[in-house]
Structure formats: structure tokens, C-alpha cells
Image (spheres, rainbow, N blue to C red):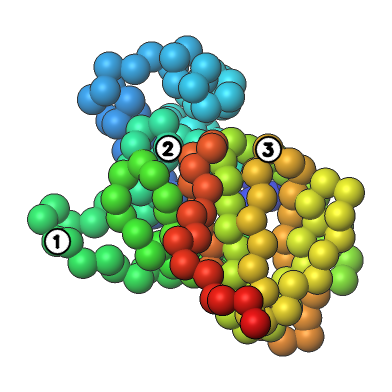
Amino acid sequence: MDDEGQAHDEPEDLGPVLDAVGPRLRALRVERGTTLAELSETTGISVSTLSRLESGGRKPTLELLLPLARAHQVALDELVDAPETGDPRVRLKAVQRHGMTMMALTRRPGGLQAYKMIMPPNPPERQPEQRTHEGYEWLYVLSGRVRLLLGPHDLLLEAGEVVEFDTRTPHWFGNPGPEEAELLSLLGPQGERMHVRARPKQG
């Protein structure tokens, strides 16, 4: 869907939030003395797309903001809605993305980022579109069911199940219904995986 179509689908109260993302991206880049060409090489996003994001000509999406947050070493919620300076508390502000409610659970720049996601059932007519990006993801289903397309695999995850994968593998996940699904997502830079220190004894 084109940018104009996305704009019509966004809730009205998100307009000012999204409009502020471009200037914040430019300020971060200028503060770090990074050129658009250097940022393009780091993120894999074209110079023209980066320029349009900063000028407001391109609406920010999760697929674009994730690599930019990693490149600038800031938490995703700082790009979308900067927290008050000096306040160490995690603010659970809900953000709507692609019909899904997301809440950032971490604020530290770089490293692993944690999110809680609430997903309504996907419309039957919606066709899954697998995507790739740098990083490593860990998903844990709290309630409901989540369908994960991972390369050639088609998995149905139930509550209590967990999966981790390299996000350079084409992937898509959604809610096959019938009820709402809740899940936790941990997303780390490429090569940063989960480390299990303790395991139950085998009987």
C-alpha cells in the first residue's frame, strides 16, 4: 500500500506523533555527525527514503524505524515519542502499528528491545507478506494463537509456546483467531541471541 493509503488508515491522534518522527530522526543524525549516505550503508535503507522520512514525505513504519533505532542506538519509543528527561520509569504507552497494539517495555539504547503486542484476529482476506531485516527475534505467546510464517515453515503457536529466529529469514506473524492474541517480543541486534542459564533437570 502506498504512503497516502497508509495515512488514511492511521488514527487521527497518531498524526502529530508521526509528524514529529522526521525532525527527531534528522536531529539524531546531525547530532552524531552522520551523513545520509553513511546511515543508508548502516541500515540498508536508501538515501532517498531516509531523506523523505526526515522531511515528512514518507510515513515512518516499524520496518524502517527498527534499523534506524539500532543505528542511532536509541530505544524505538524514543523515536516515536521521546520520554521526559531524567525519568527512569518505563512508560507503557500504547502505539498502533499495522492494526496491532505495541507497548515498549525497555528504554535502554541499543541491545535487546522488549515489546508487548496485542493482536486482533487478522482479516481472512489479508495476504501474509514475509519480510526480512537485521536482527534476532524471540516471541512468547501469552494468550490466544499466533501463526508464524518462517521461510518455508508455517507454524501455529499456542499460549505458552516460544520461538526464536534470525530475522534475515523471511518471516511474518499474525493472529489466525478467533480471539485476541497477546505476545512478548524480544528483538536484538544481529548475532545477539537469548542465553538460557538454568534448565530443569531431566527426570
Q: Quadrant of the C terminus?
A: bottom right
Relative to 24, say whether 183 is above or below: below
- Neighbour tally class for label 1: few under 14, some 14-19, many 20 plus, Cα within 10 Å: few
Q: Looking at the picture, which amino acid does disc 1 mark?
A: Asp
Give the camera-side residue of 83 and 117: 117
Q: CA distance from mark 1 to mark 2?
A: 22 Å
- Point 49% across, 22% down: residue: 42
Tag 2 residue: 70
Query: Callout 2: few (<14), some (14-19), or many (20+) C-alpha neighbours within 10 Å?
Result: many
Q: In the orientation shown, which residue stands out farthest toward the bottom? A: 179
Residue 44, position as x, y percentages in the image: 58, 24
Task: Please tell me which residue is depicted at 72% across the width and 61% down the height of the picture.
Answer: 173
Where is residue 127? Give x, y as percent: 86, 57
- Sequence-wise first label, 1 or 3: 1
Residue type at mark 2 is Arg
Residue at far front of view = 203
Picture coordinates of residue 2 (x, y %)? 70, 42
Q: Quadrant of residue 147?
A: bottom right
Graded by Cα atoms within 10 Å as few (under 14), some (14 to 19) or many (20 or more), the crowding at tag 3 reads some
Q: CA distance from mark 3 to mark 2?
A: 15 Å
* Residue at the spot 49% in from the left edge and 42% down from the top edge: 192
Which residue does the numbered mark 3 point to in the structure image?
A: 168
Q: Earlier in the sequence, mark 3 or mark 2?
A: 2
Marker disc for residue 87: 1
- Whichever of labels 1 and 2 marks the residue nearer the N terminus, that label is 2
Residue at screen point 29% across, 50% down:
108
Which of label 3 and label 2 is nearer to you? 3
> Among all residues in the image, which is located at the extreme left?
86
Mark in the foreground, 1 or 3: 3
Marks 3,2: beta carbons within 8 A: no
Q: Amino acid at mark 3?
A: Arg
